[in-house]
Image (cartoon, rainbow, N blue to C red):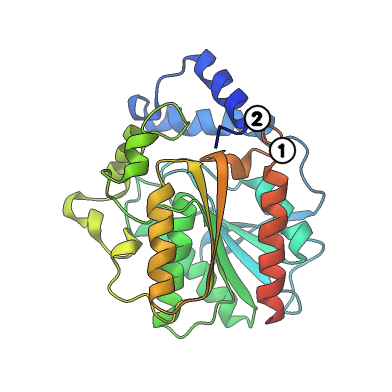
Amino acid sequence: MPLDPYAAAYLKQLEALNVPPISEATVGEARQRMEDGTAVLAGAVADVRAEDGVCEGVPVRTYGPHEMCGGRPVLVWFHGGGWVIGSVRTHEASCRALAARANCFVVSVEYRLAPEHRFPAALDDCWAVTQALAERGMCLAVGGDSAGGNLAAAVALRARDHNLPLQLQLLVYPVTDCDFTRSSYGAYATGYGLTRGNMRWFWTQYMMGSQIEHPEAAVLRAKDLSGVAPALVIVCEYDVLHDEGVAYADALKSAGVAVDVIEEPGMIHGFFRMPAAIPRTQTAYDVCAAALEKAFSGS
């Protein structure tokens, strides 16, 4: 279907700025650009308590109505940004929205970024926080958007291998593979926000050479997906990552994992952190919150 009109307006504004692609920027410039654009894309955020802390040496920000305790479930959230950019600040709107609507705590993880800290540093940080919360007896789900979705999927694989129970993996337009020849990479290579060139650059910063196909990075290449947590996978029509997100959902289903797939027609990559620019983001928050509540209740 045609582009969502609000997404189209955002892309038009982006084009008018004539900003060089991320792949032509320094890492510092790319990070600052994302930080600078956050406030206008997020707008007013849900009024929930936010508290900074450290878990297993990893900085975290916890969102919820009061201090975290064992009686309320926890979503461990990993922000997007190609493993290179982004922070708990750039993804605060979505974390606050999910905490408010799903009646849970959200622990947003400030994992180490590439290229200063290449694979598997980010994954190790995300896993350390998830494992520590599980040891405290928390009822857990994991989730993330884009590269954060990739980290959530990889954490879910580790959780299975360590017999650590997760109620859900919430994967919002996740990176699952390193194959730039997929149809969606060709169809939406430029002009829709996230480009094929940007993704090549992100992978180069994150991985070392042949490691790019490591099954904890390109999770679609994991030999066995059976036994991982149930999943909600959200994919966007106008997104280079669309096809690999669908392929991962299909692979999970083939492995016997319960999966719900939400196709976002007319939508672009990144919308989940743009509630002020793209109103349909609010509907996506509601869908995710309902899935979390259902998973946490054991339904």
Q: Secondary structure at mark 2?
A: helix
Instruction: Name the quadrant containing residue 26.
Output: top left
Q: Which residue is mark 1?
A: 279
Q: Secondary structure at mark 1?
A: loop
Q: Where residue 100 sits: x, y (%)?
A: 78, 57
Comparing 226 with 155, the one in front is: 226
Does 126 sit above or below residue 263? below
Mark 1 and 2 residues: CB-CB less than 8 Å, in contact?
yes
Residue drawn at x 49%, y 51% as measured from the top left: 173
Instruction: Name the quadrant containing residue 106.
Output: bottom right
Q: Which residue is mark 2?
A: 6
Lateral position of residue 10 relative to residue 282, left or right = left
Comparing 269 with 153, the one in front is: 269
Residue drawn at x 73%, y 56% as measured from the top left: 286
Residue drawn at x 51%, y 40% as measured from the top left: 269
Q: Give amino acid for label 2.
A: Tyr
The mark that comes first in sequence, 1 or 2, is: 2
Q: Which mark is residue 186?
A: none
Q: Where residue 14 sits: x, y (%)?
A: 54, 21
Can residue 92 be seen in this snapshot?
A: yes
Q: Give amino acid for label 1.
A: Pro
